[in-house]
Image (cartoon, helix red, strand yellow):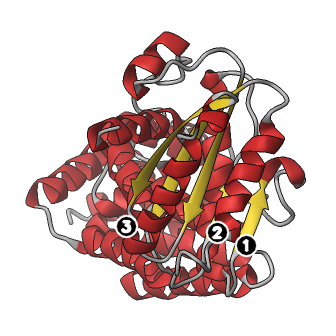
Amino acid sequence: MESMAYDAILMRLRALYFKEVFHGEQAEMADANRICSTEFKMGAFCVAIFATGTATDAEKILRALQDKCNSAPAQAIYESIVFPMCAEVFIVSNYRHGARGEIEGMLEGVFDSLDSLAISGVAVLAIGSEEDRFEDIVRSYTRAKVCAFARRALATNCIFNCDAMKWPPRGMGGALDMGKKYRLSNALRRRARDEIRNATVELLDNIIDRSRKEPLIVLPAFLEVLCVYEANCECVGLSAGADAWRYFQQRRRELEATASFEDAYGVFRRILQDMTATDPDAERAKHAAVLKMQKYIEDNYRHDISLAELAAIVGLNKNYICDLFKNDTGVTIRQYLIAQRMERVKLLLQDSDCTIAEIAQSVGYSDDKYLSAQFKRRYGVAPGEYRKNCLWREDNGR
């Protein structure tokens, strides 16, 4: 099969995996066969991955697998498409129910011949789960990919068979240390470059330390770190939406394709570089968002304005707008709201006969004592004393 067909198969699997093409719609067998140039029929499906250290090693395994899959005995039992991708070899198999043992035997036979193939580094055979429908093959692919990624944490060759182990393996749920995860999230919201770098390295180092005992956590944990960045997508100058989705999908692809832990660190270094790149249009958009929030606060200071309310108005993450507003104005959103209320209180004290309680209600405070405390903290005098001083000045022509 030509390499373009290999690419088409991989593209299809990745499209299913990332939900890029079908947006949740299920694939149909006819469409799958058209893309994969196969004649897959209803039966059982499985994706397996040989992960190696180099493209040269992957090429050796590819030839061995093609010889096995193209033999007459094999074709009587299953149809497999074998294709290379960087330092990995993908095997997509369609076979009759009950034949999984023979598929595994073929794959393990190739694995047992690694020494004779002169494979230079550590290799992993990851056999994904068996699925009854092609629509569900993404599950087999995802699990095999998680297992294949574990090669980076291993010192010896290893086979992972997803149907022979309890899934998900221990430690994969919530793979990140919550304290370290919160530290990174907080640093991202504040756009504190050094803290972001340190928190990211601390998380990645922790993942790698754990991976010695739990190698299968590596890919899910790395992707979880990426999700922390994505949840604060404004830190790379992106509003939540299609652009942010595309940006982080590309980073996922790069992360998944890394050949070493150092390469994985490099993906996050790139995000950090993107985050600090100056984009005049993005800066103008941020300032415009702050002006819009200020105007809304000035027009609606009489009621309690929530972060969710402001975030919806400017279409940004509610955690992000706090830092955005403070960086642009030098005060927090709450401080700005209080300032608007206090300025209104001053005007009412000067130009109306309203009681302090009435003024408090008119600017959004249900407690006049709380208003008095806020006013005195800000201006150094109580509201009643401020009104007396204003009247004294008027009476004395000042």
The quadrant of the picture occupied by the N terminus is top left
397 displayed left or right of 255: left
Can residue 220 be seen at all in this image of the molecule? no
The quadrant of the picture occupied by the C terminus is bottom left
Q: In this figure, which residue is indicated by the disc labeled 1? A: 158
Q: As rendered, which of 298 and 163 lies closer to the eye? A: 163
Residue type beneath disc 2: Val
Q: Above or below — where is 305 with respect to 392? A: above
**Quarter of the rendering containing residue 384:** bottom right
Whole-percent x and y of residue 276? 25, 74
Q: Secondary structure at mark 1?
A: strand
Image point (68%, 21%), residue name: 133
Q: Which mark is residue 238?
A: none
Q: Which mark is residue 326?
A: 3
Counting residues from the start of the chain, the first of labels 1 and 3 encountered is 1
Q: In this figure, which residue is indicated by the disc labeled 2? A: 124
Q: Above or below — where is 41 with respect to 233? A: above
Residue type beneath disc 3: Lys
Image point (52%, 81%), residue name: 118
